[in-house]
Image (spheres, rainbow, N blue to C red):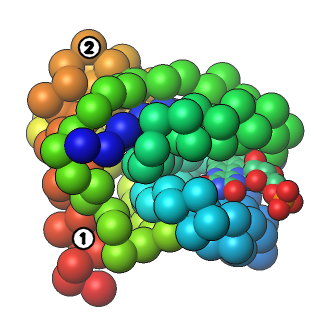
Amino acid sequence: MTFRIIYSSASSTPMQLDDLEDILEQAQANNPAQRITGALVYADGFFLQILEGEKTRVEDLMQIIAKDLRHEHLRVLYAGDVWAPAFSDWSMAYVSATPEQVARWAGLSGTTELPEVWEDIRHNPEKAAQLTESILDVLMKE
Ligand SMILES: Cc1cc2nc3c(=O)[nH]c(=O)nc-3n(C[C@H](O)[C@H](O)[C@H](O)COP(=O)(O)O)c2cc1C
């Protein structure tokens, strides 16, 4: 078993490639020591991050990330045990996406407004699982 948290947030300022690289460098430097893996998606001013690992370690990291001023309106969409980590090959994978892609990955049609997509995922854990699988598919094809 492993613990998984999926959250969404909004970047405080528009992210340039350098800004995203800074975040990824921090994640990739720190996460291996905590045996945390995951994926970070950036789409049109919004972050979606999946963190997986031992529950207390993931929760501790969430506390740190939640205080980070580079993003705001952090909202947990899913938190729970899963059988195995999906991103065990990545200390933190990065995926750049459009809102349309994110909506499609979660199996949603009819909206491309990310706040609506986040709400839908928050109320439907099976969509959180579907989104995770889709992001993994994208990474495997890279
Ligand atoms: C969207 C987002 C995702 C982040 N993800 C991680 C992460 O997975 N691991 C991590 O250590 N820091 C992550 N950070 C950075 C932390 O908030 C914090 O700045 C960092 O852990 C401090 O690391 P340091 O003590 O090595 O400087 C993230 C920040 C943001 C804005």
Q: Is mark 2 within 8 Å of ligand 1?
A: no
Residue found 24% across the figure and 43% down from its top: 1
**Direction from residue 26 to residue 57 in the image, left or right:** left
Note whether residue 14 is visible: no
Q: Secondary structure at mark 1?
A: helix
User: In the rendered image, which quarter is residue 131 located in?
Assistant: top left
Residue 66: x %, y % from top left? 71, 32
| N-terminal-most mark, 2 or 1 | 2
Residue located beneath label 2 in the image: 123
Q: Secondary structure at mark 2?
A: helix
Residue found 62% across the figure and 72% down from its top: 28
Q: Nearer the viewer, residue 1 or 41?
A: 1
Farthest bottom residue in view: 142
Three-letter code, disc 1? Val
Q: Residues within 10 Å of mark 1 (few under 14, many from 20)?
A: few
Residue found 50% across the figure and 69% down from its top: 91
For residue 138, the mark is 1
Q: Report the Cα–Cα distance between label 2 and label 1.
A: 24 Å
Residue 9: x %, y % from top left? 59, 34
Residue 107: x %, y % from top left? 13, 39
Q: Is residue 29 above or below residue 116?
A: below
Residue 49: x %, y % from top left? 49, 47
